[in-house]
Amino acid sequence: MQTHIDFRRIDALFHSVAEEGRDQLFEYETYELLRLSGAESVPRALMLSKGSRPSNEELAALPGDRAVLKIVSPCIVHKTDVGGVRIVEKQPGKIRSAWRRMLDEVPENYAAFLERRPELTPERYAGLAGRELRRAISADTRGVLLVEFMPPDSLAFGNELLVSLRRTREFGTVLTAGLGGTDTEIYAARFRPGQAVVSASTRMTTPEQFFRLFRSTIAYEKLAGRSRGQARIVSDDQLVECFASFIEMADRYCPDNPDAPAIIEELEVNPFAFTDYQMVPLDGLCRISRPQALPAPRPVHKIRNLLQPERIGIAGVSASRPNFGRIILKNILAAGFDPENVAVIRPGARPEERVDGAPCVPDLESMGRVDLFVVAVGAEHVPALAEEIMDKDLAASVLLIPGGLGETAESAERGRALRERIDRAHADGGGPVFLGGNSLGVLSRPGRYDTIFIPGEKLEKPAGPGGRTAFVSQSGAFLVTRASKLALLDPAYLVSIGNQSDLTAGDFLRYFQDADDIDVIALYMEGFKDLDGLALCRAVRAAVRAGKEVVFYKAGRTPEGMHATAGHTASVAGDYMVCASCVRQAGAMVADTLTQFEDLAQLAALLHDKDVPGNRLAAMSGAGFEAVAMADSIQGDGFAMRMADFSEQTRAEAARLLAAQGLDRLVEVRNPLDINPAADDRLHADMARLLAADARVDGVVVGLDPLSPSMKTLPAGQRAGESLDDPQGIAALFPAVVAETRKPMVGVVDGGPLFDPLAKRLLDRGVPVFRSCDRAVAALAKYMEGRLHAQRLRDSD
């Protein structure tokens, strides 16, 4: 879409503001910015500066019989709260009276407000109180803005629109739109995510894509006249044009644009009101900052050296006790790495000395250059060790196991110094890449090594080349607990990124987006480095376009959670709503809970090769409650499935199958399908196959009725005539059906511990199994919605 933005004059406006030593535009300057950005209905305004003497003609020049007066001060943002906005009759005398009264009263009101809410005190007023505070506020007050009064068509709920740009540390500039007005924050907090406001990274969206996102909000429903008794008050084209203007400005004045003449920290119009199909900004603010140099790019291609090394060095191995270094060495060798390609650093080591079969060397220089150097010494020794490695170019990659490199206030200086030294090396075009500190390690099955320092007795390590999943986690504990629970992920790589002193989550996503041996990437995050959320989103989008699936979970979504992650391995955690929205729009499946993360990760690993043509579900069970509950679970936050309408051919064949077992008089063929507890293993399998074959069905959930006397669901010896090894039992029949169908199909084993063997047998044969039907439907629905969104992204290329 063509926009009409005068960037030359906006550059000049920002320059003049910066020359005055300000970082915030006055409201009349924000109106000018909007006008220069192409807005057509910006109210006319006249600045009434302190001491100025406008004529009666100037005061009466604005159209209409009323006018709006607004206080102009660099620090008073929420003017209404302190009497800084007044509507008066457009008579010169009344305007002058209100103008003078506001210059006296607003500083008093604002001072009283800050004394009640000291946490909101601007830095320039810190330590001031009473008369001194009032004098400072009065001195900063520039005057009053006289603004054209443009009455909105309606004052009803939902007829005001918020549109804003905000610079975020993690995702760059983010565009937000939704319900506007003084209660915007309440709407955003009380409505479900995506209902009141929506957000997107301006670097990852187009005006048309953002408009499609905005159409899901209550704000759009109201503006488009879709509620009873309300007419449309703005066209779709107007909204798209507005979003296009904001996105184009954001991309010019954003922190990742090396040519940006200034950075828009915040640009907000709240609200746009609507008068006779005109979008009228009634209040606006804008803050800017000076551009800063972008950091030197990290040599992320060296991640290959880290994940598939030919030579490994390791420091911190004890020859006499099982410390972390010794456990790491044993795990490296147990994974199949050649001990002759391992060098153990032991000061004073003799030429023939070995530990666990790996040769020892007395110092770093004797080691020679390695692909991966593992540091398992105390944090206090890390800076000197890292310095020598960088100075002498002794490693392509370094794994930092120790904590104490920036996770706590006490270690902040050590971590900062290390990061600065690494950045200098990268700026000079060299240096190894560093993983960690506070990393639990890496398991690379293609690289035939394992540095995760959990003993083998505590964590069963998979053998062989591994599946096609990479699992990246900021929390090492989360990484290993989920790897322990989710054996069917069969990960090729487990990567604990720790506190991201150098390599980030975005770097690993960039690496795996192009990896031929990876189809699924599972990612757990607590906090991002500067602009790495944006880098990660770009990598997610590239991975999805390449046909991969990304499952994502973000911790630290509440203030309490943010505080907890800040004391762990995370950088400062960002705003969760923005994070989830940006990553989801990039194409990842965003889990709302840890349980959902497990479910989505398993489904992605097991169903990646299945086709997902749509969102129509077929549900079947021999338990009536289960069939009903399946239908009740097809909608939730972030997903909405439909119950499929079976074809006449499917209905006829289903009736024939039921009749063959004498169940046709007990069962009505409909969706969800309750096939009766008398249905045996063969009927379950045949009916599942039939439903999957229906062109009107896109996914199938099958209740396997473990307690039914007609089903073979127990191991041999527990009940006469039953065995999981029976070729006519469900443990043999159902995996064959799942394997042959091209559509996603999951099973439900809703029963106690007696049926754990059945669930395990099915899982071992590649069948996604859930222990409750509602969890099965919700997980499959969320998974299929993620697949459909990814396909839409690929189709838009």
Image (cartoon, grey):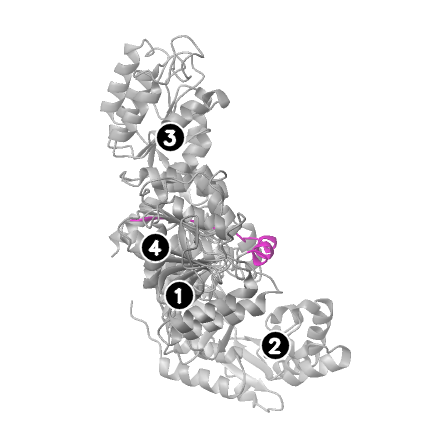
Q: Earlier in the sequence, mark 1 or mark 3?
A: 1
Q: Give the magenta range.
A: 548-568
Which of label 1 and label 2 is nearer to you?
1
Cα distance, mark 2 to mark 4?
A: 63 Å
Tag 1: amino acid: Ser
Tag 3: amino acid: Leu
Q: Residues within 10 Å of mark 2 (few under 14, many from 20)?
A: some
Residue at the far left: name it. Answer: 649
Cα distance, mark 1 to mark 2?
A: 62 Å
Which of label 2 and label 4 is nearer to you?
4
Tag 4: amino acid: Asn
**Residue 264 versus residue 399: which sits nearer the camera?**
399
Q: State the residue position of label 4.
A: 341
Up-down relation of residue 608 to residue 506 (above or below): above
Q: Do callouts 2 and 4 mark residues in contact (Cβ within 8 Å)?
A: no
Q: Considering the numbered disc 1 on the image, is that residue within a helix, a strand or a loop?
A: helix
Q: Position of residue 388 (x, y in %)?
A: 45, 71
Q: Earlier in the sequence, mark 4 or mark 1?
A: 4
Q: Earlier in the sequence, mark 2 or mark 4?
A: 2
Q: State the residue position of label 3.
A: 763
